[in-house]
Image (spheres, rainbow, N blue to C red):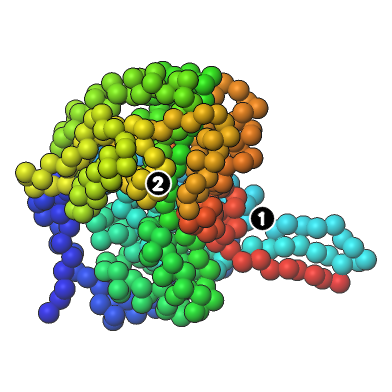
Amino acid sequence: MMSMLEVRNPWDGQVVAELELDDDAGVARTLGRAGAAFARWRRVPLEERIAQVRIGLAHFLATGDATAREVSLQMGKPLAQARGEMKTFAARAEWALAAATAALAPEVLPEEGGLRRRIEHHPLGIVLDIAAWNYPLLVPVNVLIPALLAGNVLILKHSELTPLTGRALARAFGALDVPDLVQDLVLLPDAAARLTQAREVAHVAFTGSVAVGRAVYRQAAEGLRGVGLELGGKDPAYVAADADLAFAAENVVDGACYNAGQSCCAVERVYAHREVVEALIAGMRPHLEAYVYGDPLDATTTLGPLARAAAPAFLEQQVDDAVARGAKLLLGGKRDASRPGNHFPPTLLIDVPNSASVMQEESFGPIVAVASVRDDDEAVARMNDSRFGLTASVWTRDPERAERFARDVHAGTIFQNRCDYLDPALPWTGWGESGLGSTLSLHGFRHLTKRKAIHFR
């Protein structure tokens, strides 16, 4: 008897799709096909790989609105944002296609003593990409396109919340001149854990929780496999006394609440200089109140439901904990459990102590938690009071202040007057428990290859 995965719409709890779970025999067949594909693909010249990947990209982008609608139905992203995610997918893919030749070219060193020397970048083999649900298109594209261009093949195990997206990517990129370059598997966590230990897998890219990331790291280590781990964040923003407060208020709220706050690099902690904290809070509140919460498929909706059924109760617990520790709740903070779906409103907390769960544990929801600080030194100390280190933003007109925060704050990306954004030309990497390795930029290509030293007399 076959086992099925049921996918439900987080807005109303209705069943979106039922997919057959892959069993061990199916996984073995997928690994076999991937191995055969790699044996051919690794020998295809880079120029031809680029051309083939462009064809796959065109196939995928042709699905357009249908794929965006599936994203909204599976995880609750407003349709306009899902369409935007498709456009960003295309832009990141195009950047990688344009960068591939330079990123993968041999590094030729000067001859020395009659010796010709160079460093080549060779493919790893089968890359297993365990992709998260919060950005169903952008999480896999960071690995998918560079991996293929580098000569690898990909097995995509998308989240159980968003398996239809994995299937769509496999259809588009898996039917090129070399078949089976991209395959998807529908697996529950236990079966996915076994797959990370398969001897055929050369590299595991995982996006998700710290707890599961640790397990993936241990399992990969048993086979001496490479790993890339993107494990989320608790990203701080500091609004300095000289900030453009209207601009900061609008953009920090957007950075906290876009995608219902379900972003690894969402603003999750806001520290404001005590001279401007009251004005900042006053400026934030109208933006929070302006969100239109509703059905993700409704064109007027700007804030959708949370993807996970357990998320509203968790966020409510974080709010209650903060209030018990002395914080003040100005807006939202209570889940709506009176109807089906995963509902939680935009929430504003102020005077939040750094010991509160909402300042330490990843929320992944539309909460803006604010605390005042005396000066830049206290801001740096509070920002670094976290086991995470994905991104951090400083809102200031002073470039020297921004450089000081870039030097002293422990995070993979530091923004000035910007937040919640990935530039494909810059490496996406985490400090602390935010992860290991890099995607994006030339470093993302290098992370998906192994070096070979050529030393010829």
Q: Residue 105 carries which label?
A: 1
For marks 1 and 2, give the CA distance: 49 Å
- The image position of residue 411, as x and y in percent, is 54, 46
Q: Which residue is drawn at 55% across and 29% down?
A: 375
Query: Which quarter of the picture shows residue 281?
Result: top left
Relative vertical location of residue 138 with respect to residue 256 in this rendering, above or below: below
- The image position of residue 166, as x and y in percent, is 31, 58
Q: Which residue is drawn at 30% across and 69% down?
A: 189
Label 2 SS: loop
Between discs 1 and 2, the one toward the N terminus: 1
What is the residue that sits farthest to the left in this orientation? Answer: 338
Q: Residue 146 carries which label?
A: none
Query: Residue 438 versus residue 233: which sits nearer the camera?
Result: 233
- The image position of residue 298, as x and y in percent, is 16, 33
Relative vertical location of residue 37 with respect to residue 368 in this rendering, above or below: below
Residue 231 visible in image: yes
What is the residue that sits farthest to the right in this orientation? Answer: 113
The quadrant of the rendering that contains the N terminus is bottom left
The crowding category of the residue bearing disc 1, from other C-alpha atoms within 10 Å (few below 14, some 14 to 19, many at least 20), is few
The quadrant of the rendering that contains the C terminus is bottom right
Residue 24 left/right relative to 409? left
- The image position of residue 305, as x and y in percent, is 20, 42
Q: Identity of the amino acid at label 1? A: Ala
Label 1 SS: loop
Residue 383 left/right relative to 309? right
Q: Mark 2 points at which residue?
A: 355
Residue 81 left/right relative to 111? left
Q: Identity of the amino acid at label 2? A: Ser
